[in-house]
Image (cartoon, rainbow, N blue to C red):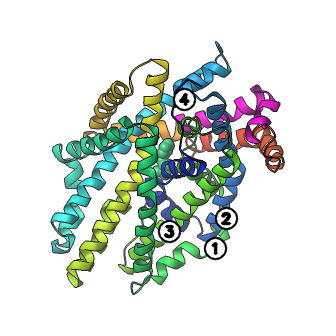
Amino acid sequence: MEPNREIFGSNLMAIFALAGSAIGLGNIWRFPYMVGQHGGAAFIIVYILCTLVFSLPIFYCESIIGRRTGRSSIGAMRQLAPGSRWTLIGVFTVLGPLMITSFYSVVGGWSIAYLLRSCFSSFGAMSHEEIGSLFANFTGSVWGPVLAHTAFLLISAIIISAGVRKGIETFSKYSLPPLVVLMILLMVYSISLPGAHAGVEYMVKPDFSRLDARAIASAMGQSFFSLSLGMGTVLTYASYMSKKDNIISTGAWTAVFDLGFALIAGFVVMPAVFAAGLEPQAGPGLVFETLPFIFADMGAASPLLSKVVTVVFFLSVLIAALTSEISMYEVCTAYLVEERKMSRRKATVLVFVVAWSIGVACAVLPKVFDFCDFVSSNVLMTLGALAFSLFIGWRMKKAVVEAELTNDGSLPGNRKVFKVFYFLTRYIVPVGIGIIFLSNFITF
Ligand code: PHE
């Protein structure tokens, strides 16, 4: 580890930062929809199994590399496998986050735009036709999305330039608890709407007949994306963990918070969608097209309530997006600071310029947006996760891996988990990741 390198203030703070990275747009716009599509509670069970069998081991692989070296992805691989091809993993895991930083910022920008709209004008005052064309009109224009993307990226840059403790840790510490409280309030409201029970049923009714191969591949892919794996994000955050922190429990808590938030988001979104008699859909359409109809209908009945609910909702989306965005931004920044010896401020500005440029292309050209989304989420992320698991399972010395997970034997309780983890990492995880990777290219 470099001298004077910052670390998180405590294990709890590391969990906050990691949970902040995990909790993001994926939880709000993809998880609820997938649950309903693939058999309700039956999907949730598969999702939890995938997290235990595949995602947590990968989380631990990245954490071991990061904490062991105290360096971010490229530097860590250079230190552990100097001069070998393994250092290429580092390159993937800087390109991937750079791409996600860019297009995620475009979507983060949309949430700023919708938040401002809900503050200063009302969805309730709009007709269904106006609402129907709102998203297409907004994303079809040039200035709105570009300005919003710029604002979102700028906020992220300010947080990143403040550093690990004053920036990332402070922001995560103060934004996550209110985010969870706001979402719980929205959930209570949403479930109490007349007709909401169909949405609750959509989430909880187990239908095992819908659990096909696609459902299982989707559960794995979603669990990866949601825990921010394969991108060097977990690796970089773990490099800021103290040698005393418990990697195993940190991963477990992060997964619990991430799943808990995804479930809450499901009970916010789906009951409201069903109460309004609308069809659920996946992706940005759910948050930016379907939900505004509901806010508009509420506005007709009670303008003030509609305003409050809308502002709270888009504020929550914005916070969730920001805590994820900064984790990817940090991977790129840490690389420039540590390996290219730039000052943190300079590195933040350089990442801003590059991510802003790619983001502008994503904001105005939907094809570039889809390309960045596909390559980073489906190709680079899975390849990164595969490489990390192979590296820990087959290249790194077993004793070193065990020492890192048990803090040199001072956490004997972790030894049992280590044994299971090691077996999964060597034999099961690479096969699972291979299946997800292929499922991106094959239609079942
Ligand atoms: N986990 C984030 C989400 O659910 C996305 C993300 C992916 C963040 C990869 C960092 C790295 O939205």
Task: Say left or right for 73 vs 109.
Answer: right
Q: Please state which of the two labelled residues, at mark 4 or mark 2, is closer to the viewer.
A: 4
Judged by depth in the image, the label closer to the viewer, 1 or 4, is: 4
On the image, numbered disc 4 is attached to which residue? 72
Residue 193 visible somewhere in the drawing: yes
Q: Residue at x 20, y 65 (%)?
A: 119
- What whole-number distance in Å separates the C-alpha atoms at marks 1 and 2? 9 Å
| Mark closer to the observer (2, 3) | 3
Of residue 317 and residue 85, the one placed in the foreground of this image is 317
Would the CB of label 2 be found within 8 Å of ligand 1? no
Separation of marks 4 and 2 at Cα, in angstroms: 34 Å
Disc 1/disc 4 C-alpha distance (Å): 42 Å
Upstream in sequence: badge 4 or badge 2: 2
The residue that mark 3 highlights is 264
Task: Mark 4: give few (<14), some (14-19) or many (20+) Cα within 10 Å.
Answer: many
Vertical position of residue 193 compared to residue 203: above or below: below
Q: Are marks 1 and 2 in contact (CB under 8 Å)?
A: yes
Give the mark nearest the N terminus, 3 or 4.
4
Q: Amino acid at mark 3?
A: Ile
Which residue matches tag 2? 45
- Side of 380 where 395 appears, left or right: right
